[in-house]
Image (cartoon, rainbow, N blue to C red):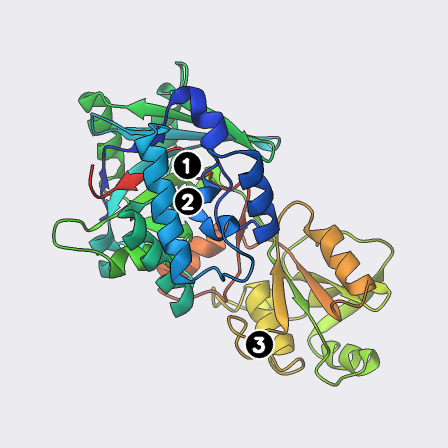
Amino acid sequence: MAQIFPFKGISPKPELAAKVIAPPYDVVTREQVKTWGQENPYNFLHVTRPEGDLPDDVVFNDEQTYKQAQTYWQKLLNEQVLIGSDQAALYVYEMHAPSGRQLGLLSLVDILEYEKGDIRRHELTRPDKEDDRIKHIQAVNGQLSPVLLTVKDSGEILQQLQKLTHTQPDLEGAVDGVHHKIWKITDTQQQQALTNLFQDKMLYIADGHHRTAAALRTKTEKNHYCLAAIFPAQQLDIWGYHRVVKDLNGLSAEQMMEQLAEHYEINLLDEAAMPAKPGDIHMFLGNNLYCLSRYDLEQETDPVARLDVDHLAKNVLAPMLGITDVRTDPRIAFVGGPDALDRMHQQVASGKQAVAFVMYPTQMQQLLDVSDANELMPPKSTWFEPKLADGLVCYSFTI
């Protein structure tokens, strides 16, 4: 079973945490990165998305970006904006969003446990994205963005985490309306109590498959760890992760509706809305919004086939729209987040996209079931909200 390990994290000075904290590197556009960077020289996007400080013609995986990441990382260390802990610690992590409070734990996990299958995955990775994370790890000689893991918990882990948050946090800051707090746990008895709660548990990747794979590919005999934020399963919220497609693959709207009727009961909706239950997919097509209701959901027992994203991929995206690999086909894009519905509606109404599919969220139990069955979900099956912040606790190989 997986284990957790304290470590000497690198964090901002407490008075600078609110300036350093940044959204995760993979959910912001280059334009947003440039704006954040111009407004704030301390923002951690200078390190995690360094192309924002480079000319526009420098792409994200150009060698210059990794050199720039190294330069800015060293700058924040030299100026003591970031400082290393003198004691190994575990870090209680709270995210407080308008939807509620979520508690987890920042620690190291042994990447060899991922290799053995005791840290379970549910998605395939793309080599180009793995390579990007590997080069970033090598440039800064550390892991700066935690992987989001989850764990089945009957309440003991959450109760213990709650006990450790009755004092003032050591670090705090806000990103996009979410308040993030960190409590540094250096007491060895408290650390052991937490470690004991995890020692018989299986861990599951919720978000960060590419970072996990990159940690495995960069492991050494002395360093075979991965920076992880572990949250009890009941603490995490999965939102729908939606699909937009640029064209109908030569079909007319009428032909597509005829083919869809073979797999779904179709009803016209009066207004844009998220699906209300599993088995329903809402579709923007032309000037209309439809509800597509699966015929087969109640009879299906396979954990992957029960996923609406899998059903859509096998019955619509591939045979009707000619999209056989959603990881590489440029005609499909993915939309997540609080404003996803409005963005998809606008894209179809403007003609930028031909059709949009609004997905009911994959459920946490579905993620666990697929992982336990050693099966894989289609890419982009889950969108976790709120997102972990970057810049509050980093793992350096040299500390």
Does residue 305 appear anywhere in the picture? yes
Q: CA distance from mark 2 to mark 3?
A: 39 Å
Looking at the image, which residue is at 49% across and 53% down?
Answer: 54
Q: Amino acid at mark 3?
A: Lys
What number is the disc on residue 314? 3
Q: Which residue is mark 1?
A: 391
Q: Earlier in the sequence, mark 2 or mark 1?
A: 2
Where does the C terminus fall, quadrant-wise? top left
Does residue 146 appear anywhere in the picture? no
Say if mark 2 contacts mark 1, CB within 8 Å: yes
In the image, 378 versus 266, the foreground residue is 378
Looking at the image, which residue is at 38% across and 36% down?
Answer: 154
Q: Amino acid at mark 1?
A: Gly
Question: Please, is residue 157 above or below residue 28 in the view?
Answer: above
Looking at the image, which residue sits at the far front?
55
In the image, 348 versus 242, the foreground residue is 348
Question: Please, is residue 390 above or below residue 265 in the view?
Answer: above
In the image, 387 versus 290, the foreground residue is 387
Q: Secondary structure at mark 1?
A: loop
Q: Secondary structure at mark 3?
A: helix
Percent of width and height locating residue 211: 36, 54
Looking at the image, which residue sits at the far bottom?
250
